[in-house]
Each structure stands twice: as C-alpha cells, then as structure tokens.
Image: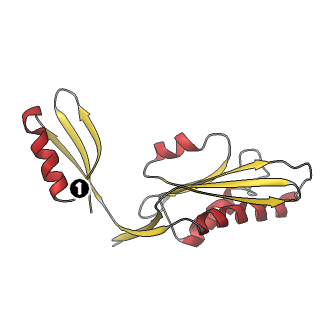
Amino acid sequence: MITTYKTITTPTQAEFKDKGSRFIAYAYPIRTLADVKNKARHWCYAYRLGVDGMQFRANDDGEPSGSAGRPILGQIDSVGVTDVLVVVVRYFGGMLLGVPGLIHAYKESTAQALAIAEVVEKNVEKTVWLKCEYPVLNEAIRIAKQYQADIVEQDLQLDCKLTVKIA
C-alpha cells in the first residue's frame, strides 16, 4: 500500500537554447485535472497526477509526434514525482532542429526546471466530505483544523458541505 509520494512545492521555470530557438519550461505543483486545464492550453506539456500516478498525459501540440510531450513526461517520471505539470513554450529561432533535436530540447528544458524545484515527500491523504448545518459550521471547521485536516473546498448552500483532506 502506498503511504507517501513525491511532488514539488512551488512553481519553477528554466530556459534552454538551441540553434536560436528558446525552450522555456514551467513546472507547477497541481492537485486536480482542473489545475492542468487552467495552466496548459496551447503549449507542449505533460502531467502526472495521483498517488499511483495512473492519471497522466503528454501533448505535442503541433510538434512531430513524440518529440515534445513524451520527453517532458519522461523527465517527470525520472524525477519520480506526481501531482506535477510541466509546460514548455518554444520560441522558434529560424533553424529546424529535427526530431532528435526537439526531443533533446524539450527533455533538457524540463530537466532543468525540475532540477531547481524543491521535491518533497508527502503522506497520502484521504478525502472526507463533511455535511452540517450553519449553526455548527464553525465547530466543524475547528475540529477539522484540530486534526490538521486541509479544507480544500466549501459549498455553503442550503447545507454546509466541506471537502477535507486528512493525512
């Protein structure tokens, strides 16, 4: 049973240059697929999510197949982290790099961004949903904080619903 996993703590950025082209890699800690959609839209990227790492994707976004997304994902995997998104922006410098050159550039820019990221080991968290009425909301929050639970979402409609993660 998996009880811990590795991830990064803060966003990082690194740049790699090759034959006039610039490759800027951005590494982000993420928690949900929605985080990916907010950060990665029209750029080459890869992510891995979840303690088991089974939720992942690599996107070449117009580069030759397998020349961008897979090298990015390969670097995420070589560091052994999850809950990580890396987006690489390429500024074309006028010279074609060819598929091997692109693979090297995307891999190297990602490696540099992840090399400067602080990698931490975290305990696996369990998600719990709490439902209560308004008069006891403050008490529910106090108890959650007493047990070092992380309140990740609050839905304060007719009833109060809290999404809580506990290590």
Q: Which of the 4 quarters of the picture holds residue 108?
A: bottom right
Where residue 30 sits: x, y (%)?
A: 47, 52
Q: Which of the 4 quarters of the picture holds residue 17?
A: bottom right
Q: Amino acid at mark 1?
A: Ala
Q: Which residue is mark 1?
A: 149
Q: Is residue 71 visible?
A: yes
Is 113 on the left or on the right of 94, as rendered?
left
Q: Is residue 58 visible?
A: no
Between residue 54 and residue 87, name the one nearer to us: 87
Image quarter (top left, top right, bottom left or bottom right) of the N terminus: bottom left
Q: Residue at x 59, y 65 (%)?
A: 114
Is 120 on the left or on the right of 17, as rendered?
left
Q: Residue furthest top?
A: 158
Is 74 on the left or on the right of 143, as rendered?
right
Q: Residue at x 59, y 67 (%)?
A: 116
Q: How many marks?
A: 1
Neighbourhood count class around disc 1 (C-alpha, 10 Å): few under 14, some 14–19, many 20 upward: many
Where residue 120 sits: x, y (%)?
A: 44, 69
Q: Residue at x 87, y 54 (%)?
A: 20
Looking at the picture, the colour scheme in use is secondary structure
Q: Residue at x 62, y 61 (%)?
A: 73
Q: Residue furthest left?
A: 135
Image quarter (top left, top right, bottom left or bottom right) of the C terminus: bottom left
Where residue 79 sits: x, y (%)?
A: 56, 71
What kind of element bears circle 1? loop
Where residue 47 sits: x, y (%)?
A: 56, 55
